[in-house]
């Protein structure tokens, strides 16, 4: 079964600095999708960025970018120019292309210091 | 564009009772998934509905059941509530077509079982 591991329960970053959140996953499949979701204290899960496994190019969405290493099964999120509004729980998620079960990691709580 | 909405926001039930949670999908989305998020953990997939049929199920017992209606809204029903069912229940909708693997979440229903 696919598993997703986020090894950093908590991270902190200074406002305007850059932070990287780690995620590894375990799968025997070759076709899948990876996501980072943000869950603020208001609890609504917001899609931050997505990556299709068949794409070699790393996804980028404004200040958010990923480092997708398919062979290493690693999918880290880089947040540049961190803002106070980036403070939240961040979840890494995996979804197989062959079924509808999305697996989430345990999350990383990001604190942004002014 | 209206996002995913869920009702009620909070709910308190007694062990052994039954509960129904509701979800309205985002406009144009025909697939709805339900997740259980225990405190301090990532969401766990319960099941997914597509065109009113169950289209995938996670490791949850049959007392967790659902429905999807012709307008793509959905219900999650839980019978014989147990204390461990206390959690945030999240609904997510997905569009059809090539972006069907993406999921957009509602704000959740916080269920407390006493």
Image (cartoon, coloured by chain):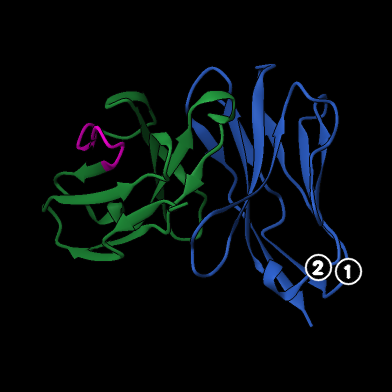
Chain colours: A blue, B green
Label 1, label 2: how far apart the Cα atoms are: 5 Å
Name the mark on residue A17: 1
Residue appearing at x 47%, y 36% in the figure: B94
Q: In this view, does B6 lie above or below B68?
A: below
- Marks counted in the figure total 2
Magenta run includes residue B63: yes
Magenta run includes residue A15: no
Residue appearing at x 53%, y 55% in the figure: A45
Q: Is residue B34 above or below residue A31?
A: below
Q: Tags 1 and 2 in contact by the CB under 8 Å rule?
A: yes
The residue that mark 2 highlights is A82
Residue appearing at x 81%, y 68% in the figure: A82
Q: Is residue A50 above or below residue B50?
A: below
Residue B76 horizontal/vertical position (percent): 25, 43
* Label 1 chain ID: A
SS state under label 1: loop
- Label 1 in the same subunit as label 2: yes
Task: Please give left or right for residue B23 compared with residue B95 in the image.
Answer: left
Q: What stretch is highlighted in magenta?
A: B62-74
């Amino acid at each position: 079964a696919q598993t997703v591991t986020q090894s950093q329960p908590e991270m902190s970053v200074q406002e305007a600095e850059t932070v990287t959140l780690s995620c590894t996953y375990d799968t025997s499949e070759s076709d899948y999708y990876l996501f980072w979701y943000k869950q603020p204290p208001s609890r609504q899960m917001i899609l931050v960025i997505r990556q299709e496994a068949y794409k070699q190019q790393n996804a980028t969405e404004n200040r958010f970018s990923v480092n997708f290493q398919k062979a290493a099964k690693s999918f880290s999120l880089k947040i540049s120019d961190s803002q106070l509004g980036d403070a939240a729980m961040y979840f890494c998620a995996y979804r197989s292309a062959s079924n509808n079960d999305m697996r989430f990691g345990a999350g990383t709580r990001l604190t942004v210091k002014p | 564009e209206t996002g995913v909405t869920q009702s009620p926001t909070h709910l308190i039930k007694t062990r052994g009772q039954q509960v129904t949670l509701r979800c309205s999908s985002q406009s144009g989305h025909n697939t709805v998934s339900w997740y259980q998020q225990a405190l301090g953990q990532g969401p766990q997939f319960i099941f997914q509905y597509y065109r009113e049929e169950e289209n995938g199920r996670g490791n949850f017992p049959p007392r967790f059941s659902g429905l999807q209606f012709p307008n793509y809204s959905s219900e999650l029903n839980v019978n014989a509530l147990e204390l461990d069912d206390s959690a945030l229940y999240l609904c997510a909708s997905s569009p059809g077509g090539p972006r069907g693997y993406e999921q957009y979440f509602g704000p959740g229903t916080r269920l407390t079982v006493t």
